[in-house]
Amino acid sequence: MCSPRGIAAAVWRARVAAIFAAFVLSAGCGGDPIGPVSARPQVTSIDDLARNRTSHTATLIADTASQQSILFVGGGGGSCSRELYMVGRGSTLLEFEGACRIDHTATALDDGSVLIVGGQDSLKIASETLASAEIYSPATEGFSAAGNLGTARYGHDAILLEEGTALITGGYMTNYLLHKVQTASAEMYDPALGAFSQLPDMNYPRADHTTTLLEDGSVLIVGGTTEPAPMEKYIPQEKRFQVIPDTEFARSNHSATLLDDGTVLIAGGIDLNGTTLA
């Protein structure tokens, strides 16, 4: 999954992070290309990560020293670690005091820092759902608290808006029976205030969905529902969610990619019957 905002906001979740775990792919992705796109992409083997991990995040960090770095946070497989992978130099484990997160989000902000939100604590009983958030600072290579969500969640999505705030939507909540339920709730993180604020709910509860920043600054929200449901758009100027008629389908764990002509390619995923889609 690629961000249309370029390097500073290119956030890859687990399904894309695997490229960096074993390979470097010489090709562009999404909106603003990282570099020239080769007609014949080349794959080059590189060193493994310092720790095994899954359901983690991988965030490309803008580096003023012209050194591309990828921040890896959390993940299952017994990995309670965070590491910074520097292309051509390998990985460095980072010290932290936060939770051992899985199924969280990590969003690169305009100032180069990374907002890490929610998820589950893989070391807690029944994988406790988290409301906490953190900020990673490339300057100090350290983590600091960034307040709490109004709703603890995992399997949500987060995306950086043109105004520099981060939109957090949907995900799973844990009810009093410790069952996971999808939520329609949405929140906004404002880096200037260092705090979250509640937004109106989406029209449908969603988890394992996608959010894509469109050329007009709105956000396309697709899938992630237990029943067929229309797509939605978030309108930042009005702070509201708008249903897109006649777009009903059920799909989760898919990808959504903004193309150069402004359209969005939606591919793969899982349907209501658990069937993997092409």
Image (spheres, rainbow, N blue to C red):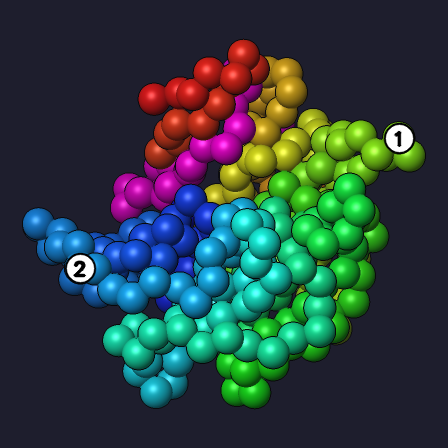
Q: Which residue is mark 1?
A: 177
Residue at image location 45% in from the left, 77% down from the top: 92
Position of 268 with respect to 40 (left or right) is: right
Q: CA distance from mark 2 to mark 1?
A: 48 Å
In the image, residue 96 sits, relative to residue 124, either above or below, namely: below
Residue at image location 76% in from the left, 60% down from the top: 132
Q: Quadrant of residue 176?
A: top right
> How many discs appear?
2
Position of 14 with respect to 99 (left or right) is: left
Magenta segment includes 248: yes
Q: Amino acid at mark 2?
A: Thr
Q: Position of residue 100 (x, y in %)?
A: 67, 59
Q: Amino acid at mark 1?
A: Leu
Mark 1 packing: few (<14 Cα in 10 Å), some, or many (20+)? Answer: few
Question: Magenta residues, as a range?
Answer: 241-264
Q: Tag 1, which secondary structure? A: loop
Residue 28 seen in the figure: yes
Q: Position of residue 49 (x, y in %)?
A: 40, 64
Closer to us: 150 or 128: 128
Closer to us: 113 or 241: 113
In the image, residue 265 sits, relative to residue 65, either above or below, namely: above
Position of 156 with respect to 148 (left or right) is: left
Residue at image location 69% in from the left, 27% down from the top: 204
Q: Quadrant of residue 6?
A: bottom left
Q: Position of residue 212 (x, y in %)?
A: 48, 44
Q: Which mark is residue 44?
A: 2
